[in-house]
Structures are given as C-alpha cells and as structure tokens.
Image (cartoon, grey):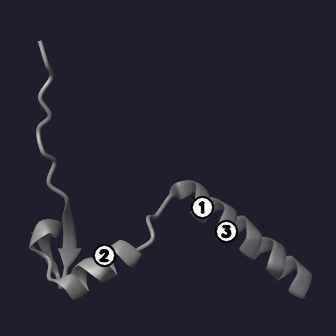
C-alpha cells in the first residue's frame, strides 16, 4: 500500500489581501522569497542585545 501526498497550498498576505503564492507574478514571488521568517527566539535575543547596547551607551 502506497501513501499519497496531498498538495499543500501556501497563502501570503499581499497588498492587504490573503492570496495563494502560486498566483503571484514574478516580481511579487521574488519579493516573497526574500522575506525573513519571524521567530520568537530571534526577537528575544534581539531584545536582550538592545538592552545591552542601552547599558553600554549610558
């Protein structure tokens, strides 16, 4: 018995609307690929680094 995969469709907010990525034009798709993904761990370390810089500046 073989397992079949169901295709997954990716959506993104573009120009205020939620749209499927497969419908993006070339320029919008290139912009989508350049985006950085938010991760909570990165934001917390960035906040800690900001605090350190403020202490050094004082």
Q: Pointers 2 and 3 in contact (CB under 8 A)?
A: no
Q: Quadrant of the N terminus?
A: top left
Asked if residue 4 lies left or right of residue 41, the reply is: left
Residue under the image location 40 percent in, 77 percent down? 34
Residue under the image location 88 percent in, 87 percent down? 57
Which dot, 1 or 2, sits closer to the camera? Answer: 2
Q: Quadrant of residue 18?
A: bottom left
The CA distance from mark 1 to mark 3 is 9 Å
Instruction: Answer with mark 1 or mark 3, whichever residue precedes in sequence.
Output: 1
* Residue on which the image places disc 3: 47
Which circle marks residue 32 in the picture?
A: 2
Instruction: Answer with mark 2 or mark 3, whichever residue precedes in sequence.
Output: 2
Asked if residue 18 lies left or right of residue 52, the reply is: left
Q: Please, what secondary structure does the residue beneath circle 2 have?
A: helix
Residue 10 percent coordinates (x, y): 19, 58
- Residue farthest front in this picture: 2
Asked if residue 28 lies left or right of residue 22, the reply is: right
* Residue on which the image places disc 1: 42
Instruction: Answer with mark 1 or mark 2, whichever residue precedes in sequence.
Output: 2
Q: Quadrant of residue 13?
A: bottom left
Residue under the image location 87 percent in, 78 percent down? 55
- Residue farthest top in this picture: 1
Which circle marks residue 55 in the picture?
A: none
Q: In the rendered view, would you say 12 is above or below 6?
A: below
Q: Quadrant of the C terminus?
A: bottom right
The CA distance from mark 1 to mark 2 is 20 Å
Q: Quadrant of residue 53?
A: bottom right
């Amino acid at each position: 018995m073989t397992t079949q995969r169901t295709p997954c469709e990716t959506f993104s907010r573009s120009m205020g609307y939620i749209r499927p990525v497969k419908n993006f034009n070339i320029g919008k798709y290139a912009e989508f690929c350049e985006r950085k993904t938010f991760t909570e761990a990165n934001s917390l370390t960035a906040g800690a680094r900001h605090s350190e810089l403020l202490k050094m500046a004082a």
